[in-house]
Amino acid sequence: MGMDSTKELLDRVIADLDTVLSDDALAGLTDAQRVAVLQGAGAVFRRAEAVIVETVATADLGDFPHSAGCRGLNELLQRTLLVDVRGASRVDRAVDLVRRPESLAGERMPARWSEMRLALLDGVVGVGGFLAATGPIEKVWDRLTIDQRLAADVALAGCARGHSLEIDADDDDPGVDDPGADEPGPSPTAQDLKALAEDLASMFDPDGEEPKDEEACRRRGITIGRLHDGVHAIRGYLTPDVAAQFQLIMDAILNPKGDGPPMPGVHFAPSDGSVVDAGDDAGADAESGADAGADADVGAGAGARADGEDPFNSDPRCVIDGRTAAQKRHDAVAMVIVIAARHNDMPTLGGSSPVLVVTVDAKDLASHAGQGEGAEFGNTASAAADNGGWATIPGSGAHVPISIAAQAGCTGAIQRVLMDEGRIIGLTTTDRVFTVHQRRAIVARDRECLIPGCHVPASWCEIHHVIEHARGGPTHTDNGVPLCWWHHRSLGASGWEIRMKDGRPQVRGPAWWDPAQRWRTPRLSLPRKARVRGALLRV
């Protein structure tokens, strides 16, 4: 096909889109028609991106921008696509990953991401989804084998085509094959592709979580700026566990169902001196401890001067603290956050103080601790011998080494929640209202509102009885799922259906979302290994 015919085809598409936009044709659509138009427009948008990427990828990038009078590819993309530097850079990155270099014989070689390239050309994924899927794997690319790279490419492309978002088919009889099990399901979002890629990267390179955590610890820090216009700027980096705990505290304080944040400033309350609460005791202890520390410092300084040493550079404990000032401030904030989370005056979140939950597969934890099935977080007897595996902090979505989960579990401020093969174990109750412990366990399992595409954090959600309590449904983790306020309120008329199967929730969506009308387990509700292995087996 020549250049003129290609240009004519594009002009025809533009003319058709002009027709769609003319005469207020879109104003009279029903809601169902608008959804269909959005889906069609999305398909057009993704194919337009594919045309752009493939047009650039098949050109000689050395001469092509210069022949158009531009300094480089980024400038050419800005001028022809009318995008900013960031938009041009995204296309540039995608081009690097889908280009098919020529061999010495002039033959086109396979692309770095050959299967994802085909998914891009087929319009099942756009540039944003392509970069979201490939980004986590690119970070560990040099530590992966060729087979692992190919497996990641195939798995992510299959996921983009609607495969492998779940491994549970609508099969009530395991002995009967489900004819629709291999049919594509709903298309994933860019966030879904990124999450799967992160799971794949952590599975293929579990030991990489240790150096990643070490790098995070080196980068952590908080800096308080100088006074400017009556305020101080604060900037820095928090480790995932500190950030997640801080976010939980902010959620509790800003929860619209609560009393809101406390008013700033000093306030006075009457007291007869006979009643002192726990917070006052803690403050008094801290104050007396500070005074004791000051006395100790004075004593140490006097001793240092007596020995002829510099009191400002001596360390009475003979320990060299290699932390920077910013890191010390970060660690101080971390301590304040942990104490504040369990303080009596802290607003509650879901009926309890904001509690950080770190999830880890029971078998991985048992292997790490060397204690067999059911070993607890705090036991790290064989941590040095086995750094494989990883845990997850739901509040930030970060993957951290199991050793970090073990350390966090020893603080006493973090509830231990063990799950085996995606099912919560050891929590039972007959109460109608879900207990605090049940709620925390359900939040750890499902992580966000159960309706696909709704990413309201589970800690903000209401816990819904899948089988209504009035119909005999138990108040049990096997019968509870998190739903945001709106999806809980509109569940009966929205077309979404929920059921439990083997202790895990499944969702069946309306026909516009899933024409096959199959029951599907939300990806975040699956056990971590099943999510990854399902992706590898279903493509």
Image (spheres, grey):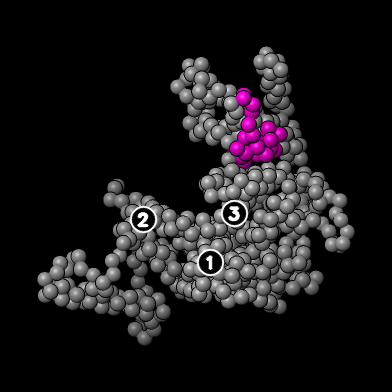
Looking at the picture, does residue 4 appear above or below residue 461?
A: above
* Neighbours of disc 3 within 10 Å: few (<14), some (14-19), many (20+): some
Amino acid type, mark 3 = Phe
- Circle nearer the N terminus (1, 3): 3
Q: Which residue corresponds to mark 2?
A: 222
Separation of residues labelled 1 and 3 (CA atoms)? 16 Å
Q: Position of residue 265 (x, y in %)?
A: 35, 63
Task: Provide the secondary structure element on which disc 3 rests.
Answer: helix
Q: Which residue corresponds to mark 1?
A: 386
- Circle nearer the N terminus (1, 2): 2
The magenta span reads 105-130
Q: Quick check: is 298 in the magenta stretch? A: no
Marking on residue 403: none
Q: Nearer the viewer, residue 351 or 528?
A: 528
Q: Nearer the viewer, residue 204 or 431?
A: 204
Q: Residue furthest front?
A: 105
Q: Is residue 112 visible?
A: yes
Q: Nearer the viewer, residue 333 or 50?
A: 50
Q: Quadrant of the N terminus?
A: top right
Lateral position of residue 404 relative to residue 456, left or right = left
- Circle nearer the N terminus (3, 2): 3
Task: Provide the secondary structure element on which disc 2 rests.
Answer: strand
Residue 492 location, quadrant: bottom right
Amino acid type, mark 1 = Asp
Q: Mark 3 near mark 2, Cβ–Cβ under 8 Å?
A: no
Separation of residues labelled 3 and 2 (CA atoms)? 33 Å
Q: Quick check: is 123 in the magenta stretch? A: yes
Q: Position of residue 113 (x, y in %)?
A: 62, 39
Q: Which residue corresponds to mark 3?
A: 204
Q: Residue at x 28, y 69 (%)?
A: 319
Q: Position of residue 212 (x, y in %)?
A: 47, 55
